[in-house]
Image: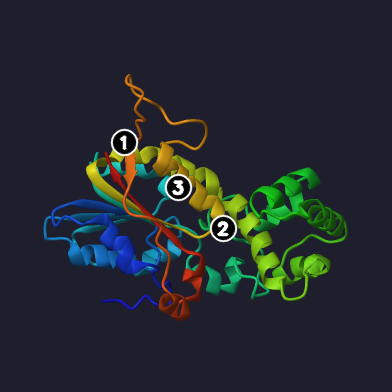
């Protein structure tokens, strides 16, 4: 077995896999392959006739491919899950696992620009072939677009002031590196809250670069069509924007408005939640700080 812990340590591994209630001969999908930790555990529980398909748009993930005839890695964004499963002749699956957010590997490579810890070039693309990077957003978005971005995706109360500072600074010099950006943001970094504020700002930019909210919505809306009755979804979120979407989808089958009702007035939703919200134990957080904000929700197709 390849040791991929340096690439990405899987979060809530036991809980998320148990949530799938794996059938030996079932067909499963891991839409966030990364280092392959969750995928390997799924394969451990599958029989010889079981199948696992995994998605990852990051080309680096291909270095962790699993040598197992039951496994197929699809180098694509999971927003296209239905299309590519159909390409492989798969119409229905027994379970889907998603561990959203950024992998440890992406955070730990300075050139990728995801982390506030390094003075890397501001990139933040999960798909390194994508056209729009963090630099494009910081240097080309209008001041008002930046305000909306930091308010909506960073949930920052001083979004207007931050956007104005960035807009003003880039007139003098194009913003290319993390250090440049952090120098511009220095007036907004309160003592003892510097890391939290920076994380919110970086999160907002990253979400916009990768269209993370749109991708998650598109993905969730395809699940009723591809998950068999009795099949499970096991989804791990890392910030409130993601978790609210997952929670609302499981509860209502949609993101806005009231859930649909049948002729008799009964609420008709595609999934029923299994158990309550699951969060990491203190011991897991101590071993893996990235797990701190993780929230796992499990549901079953009705």
* Residue where numbered disc 2 is placed: 125
Left-right relation of 160 to 277: right
| Image height of 263 relative to 226, above or below | above
Quadrant assignment, res 17 = bottom left
Closest to the camera, between mark 3 and mark 1, is 3
The mark that comes first in sequence, 2 or 1, is 2
Residue 78 horizontal/vertical position (percent): 41, 49
Which element carries disc 3, helix, strand or loop? helix
Asked if the residues shown at circle 2 and circle 1 are in contact, with their CB atoms under 8 angstroms apart, the answer is: no
**Disc marking residue 179:** none
Q: Is residue 296 visible?
A: yes
The mark that comes first in sequence, 3 or 1, is 1
Closest to the camera, between mark 3 and mark 2, is 3
Left-right relation of 72 to 118: left
Residue located at (22% from left, 56% from top) = 21
Toward the top, the furthest residue is: 263
Which element carries disc 2, helix, strand or loop? loop
Residue 125 horizontal/vertical position (percent): 56, 58
* Residue where numbered disc 1 is placed: 225
């Amino acid at each position: 077995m390849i040791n991929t812990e340096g690439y990405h340590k899987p979060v809530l591994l036991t809980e998320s896999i148990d949530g799938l209630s794996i059938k030996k001969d079932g067909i499963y999908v891991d839409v966030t392959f990364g280092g392959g930790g969750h995928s390997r555990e799924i394969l451990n529980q599958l029989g010889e006739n079981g199948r696992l398909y995994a998605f990852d748009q990051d080309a680096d993930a291909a270095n962790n491919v699993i040598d197992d005839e039951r496994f197929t890695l699809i180098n694509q964004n999971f927003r296209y899950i239905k299309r590519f499963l159909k390409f492989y002749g798969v119409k229905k699956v027994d379970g889907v696992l998603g561990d959203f957010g950024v992998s440890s590997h992406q955070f730990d490579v300075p050139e990728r620009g995801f982390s506030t810890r390094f003075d890397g070039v501001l990139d933040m693309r999960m798909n390194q072939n994508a056209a729009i990077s963090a630099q494009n957003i910081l240097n080309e978005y209008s001041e008002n677009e930046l305000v909306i971005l930091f308010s909506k995706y960073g949930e920052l109360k001083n979004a207007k002031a931050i956007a104005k500072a960035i807009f003003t600074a880039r007139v003098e010099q194009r913003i290319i590196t993390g250090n440049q950006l952090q120098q511009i943001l220095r007036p907004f970094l309160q003592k003892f809250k510097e890391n939290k504020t920076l994380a919110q700002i970086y999160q907002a930019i990253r979400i916009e670069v990768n269209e993370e909210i749109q991708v998650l919505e598109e993905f969730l809306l395809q699940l009723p069509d591809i998950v068999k009755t009795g099949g499970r979804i096991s989804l791990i979120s890392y910030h409130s924007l993601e978790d609210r979407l997952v929670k609302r989808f499981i509860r209502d089958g949609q993101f806005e408005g009231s859930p649909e009702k049948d002729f008799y007035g009964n609420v008709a939703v595609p999934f029923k939640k299994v158990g309550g919200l699951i969060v990491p134990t203190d011991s897991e957080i101590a071993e893996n700080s990235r797990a701190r904000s993780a929230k796992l929700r499990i549901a079953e197709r009705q």
